[in-house]
Image (tube, rainbow, N blue to C red):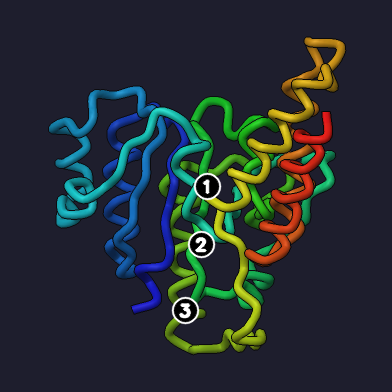
Amino acid sequence: MLTKNISFILHKPQLSENIGACARAMKNFNFQNLVLIDPKPIYPNDKILATSVGAKNIIKNSKVYKSLEHSVKDIDYVIATSARFRNKNIKHINLEDLKKINIKKKVAFLFGSEASGLSNNEISYANYTLQIPTNPEFKSLNLSHSLIIIAQYVSSILKLKTTKYKKSNKVKSASKKEIHSMITLCVKNLEQINFFKPKEKKPIMLENLRNIFYKMDLSDKETRILSSVFASLGRKR
């Protein structure tokens, strides 16, 4: 089933009841993959299980990571949800655009913490940002409400089978893991030539690099070519 390709990532969730409600919302629309990054509450706990109602299996089978970077290595497309417009060179999409996403690939929807949402650093791991249309004077949505809106919409796309995505079988998109390895090699060589200066600007420079590579929709062959280029440049020195 295509629902198995969809994951929902909660980045540093703060409230147990929201985590439980998210699991319940996922099960409402037959999604199974829940991922948590450094949750604030003890996980799992009785309140999470209670508010998940009949979705305890979602909690039981969920994955927990310390960092976002490790959670998205095997994901093909990361879609970050945000109530704020980001002045970043990253493609912004709306709910209707989800019909154009290849659901046969591994797709993850990324949600920020209840208090602060997603930072620009976390957004830099995404291929797209998605804003749910709301009252412009009151944009903030509860975490589980945001998730259920997207879950319902994606579920309707899957059921109607409206997504028709044709691509040559000879072209295979690079996995997040392959792109991550390529970026790591690139950064390693840049560090050796003292590229990241001044030092305090390194985090934002890394964000920009990730933004560039993740939005390019590279094939596995293109990723291997770029990795060879970066490796060759390192050997030349």
Q: Secondary structure at mark 2?
A: strand
**In the picture, which quadrant includes the C terminus?**
top right
| Residue in front for this viewpoint, 24 or 68 | 68
User: Which residue is tagged 1?
Assistant: 110
Query: Label 1 to label 3, Cα distance in Å?
Result: 19 Å
Q: Is residue 49 left or right of residue 195?
A: left
Q: Earlier in the sequence, mark 2 or mark 3?
A: 2
Q: Are dots 1 and 3 in contact, CB under 8 Å?
A: no
Q: Which kind of residue does numbered mark 3 sit on?
A: Ser
Is any atom of residue 92 visible in this view? Answer: no
Farthest front residue? Answer: 236
* Number of disc labels: 3
* Location of residue 183 in the rendering, given as x and y in whole percent from the top left corner: 67, 41
User: Which residue is tagged 2?
Assistant: 107
Asked which quadrant contains residue 40, the reply is top left
Q: Earlier in the sequence, mark 1 or mark 3?
A: 1
**In the picture, which quadrant includes the N terminus?**
bottom left
Query: Label 1 to label 2, Cα distance in Å?
Result: 10 Å
Query: Label 2 to label 3, Cα distance in Å?
Result: 16 Å
**Residue shown at 27% from the left, 62% from the top:** 27
Q: Is residue 168 left or right of residue 9?
A: right
Q: Is residue 195 left or right of residue 216?
A: right
- The residue mark sitting in front, 2 or 3, is 2
What number is the disc on residue 84?
Answer: none
**Residue shown at 33% from the left, 56% from the top:** 33
User: Which residue is tagged 3?
Assistant: 156
Q: Which kind of residue does numbered mark 2 sit on?
A: Val
* Location of residue 116 in the rendering, given as x and y in whole percent from the top left corner: 57, 27
